[in-house]
Amino acid sequence: MSEKRFDEASSTSPEATDPNAAPLGYHDADVFGIEEDHQIQYKTLTWPLVAVLMIAEIVSNGMLSLPSSLAVVGLVPGLVLIIFLGLFALFTSWLLIKFKTRHPEVHNMGDAGFILFGPIGREILSFGTVVFAVLATGGQILAGQIALGVLSSNKLCSMLYTGIFAIPTLLCALPRTLDQLSWLSVPSVICIIVAGIVGMTGAGLHPIEGWRDQFSVAVSTDFVTAFISITNPFFILISEMRRPDDAMKAAYTLQIFATTFYAVFAAVSYIYLGPDVASPSFTSLPVKWSKAAYGIAIPNFLIAGSLYSHTAAKLIFIRFFRKSRHLHQHTVFGWGVWISLIVLMNGAAFLLAVGVPIFNYLIGIAASLFASWYTYGIAGAFWLYDAWVYKGGFEAWKRRWAMCGLSWLTLAAGAFICVAGMYVTVKQIVDAYDSGKVSEPFSCG
């Protein structure tokens, strides 16, 4: 296991004299190394573009499902949960960023797993990252399929819409660096914001009449339906930043924007569309408003799917070519492998999306098994490990008892979300089969 800290590096590194570069010694240990003479340079992102990438990747899924979640847990409890989970994610983001800057060799969760648990940890966390990213890509492709179906009044087989949307998703994932994708994410974020405003406007102009006569800020619900409402996956994009110390600025921007937008959109949609609001919520709007909202949101579905598949391919590509010339040069072999990985990730996402009747539940299982740990639980282990190794073992835990306690609680929260989310999803799969709601594989339904 690597325990070399980046501040032990030689003062001859470029960052030693450049105040605008990464921390001292960072590039000596970082997976991409010193890139001055490289044909392909990865570490070019600024923190605003990192924030845009993360917003583009996660906001649409959460936004469109949250109104139906409020219909389950109630308005006030739902808003409290949204705010609490946003603050919790901000705390775990801080823990993750601290761990990354202390261990610059960490490029993905697999690398972090190697530091914490050795080779087995690397394989498990790498596998989870790839699986979740592929399934999330499939989820975005299905969102695009729904949008195309609404825009065309479902005149074609839904599987055909899925294939049509999968092609540009694949093409947009092809750039080798996230900096190139970040500029595509800017219009993507603008589109999802405008689509959300259009959706709220349509809901306000065409509210569901009558239900608010029985409106209550809290409704009774059982554990199963309430819990699945708050387990939307959250994964912080592994960034390629010029200044990794600025990563927390991106995290603040993401969480402030996402939490505020989630709360406003979910509350407005729920209040005007009622307890029977669909997921995605745009489907509950009148036809013209639904078409307008979906049409504007399509670029976001497209770029979000591309970012997820790019992440999956990048992890495997780095695993193959870490410290190799194929990572930084325009070699035929390097590009051939990269394109093959992009095609493989997007192809797997497409086949799973159209071929697995319980695909949406499969995303729930992956979110419970992996995203619950990536977003919440494992961040606590990062702090506990660094305090133990670098600050004095158990004595360090005792000296910083408050952070130690929070870290253990973070681990416990990840375990709870994992177990409870699995229980909820498996129960929903059983109920879906019992009620006959599961369609056939590769069907047009």
Image (cartoon, helix red, strand yellow):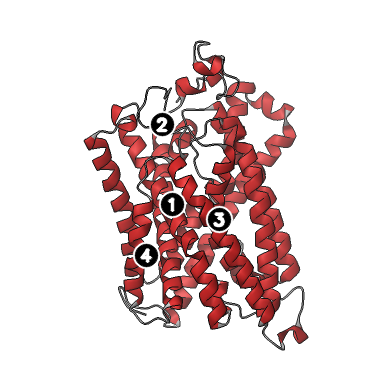
Mark 3 Cα shell of 10 Å, populated few (<14), some (14-19), many (≥20)? many
Q: Which residue lies under the disc numbered 4?
A: 165
Q: Element under label 3?
A: helix
Q: Nearer the viewer, residue 198 or 108?
A: 198
Q: Is residue 257 above or below residue 164?
A: above
Q: CA distance from mark 3 to mark 2?
A: 25 Å
The residue wearing badge 3 is 189
The residue closer to the viewer here, 317 or 333, is 333
Residue at (42%, 25%) from the top-left corner?
35
Point out the tag, 2 or 1, that comes first from the N-terminus.
2
Inter-mark Cα distance, 3 to 4: 18 Å
User: Does the CB distance between marks 1 and 3 fall below 8 Å?
Assistant: no
In the picture provided, is 204 more to the left or to the right than 42? right
Discs 2/1, front: 2
The span from disc 2 to disc 1 (Cα, nearest Å) is: 21 Å
Residue type, numbered disc 3: Val
**The disc labelled 2 sits on which kind of residue?**
Gln
Q: Residue at x 59, y 28 (%)?
A: 386
Helix, strand or loop at label 1? It is helix
The image position of residue 3, as x and y in percent, is 50, 22
Q: Which residue is mark 1?
A: 308
**Residue pointed to by mark 2:** 41
Of 436 and 57, the residue lying toward us: 57
For the residue marked with disc 1, what is the amino acid? Tyr
What x and y, as percent, mark residue 155? 36, 82
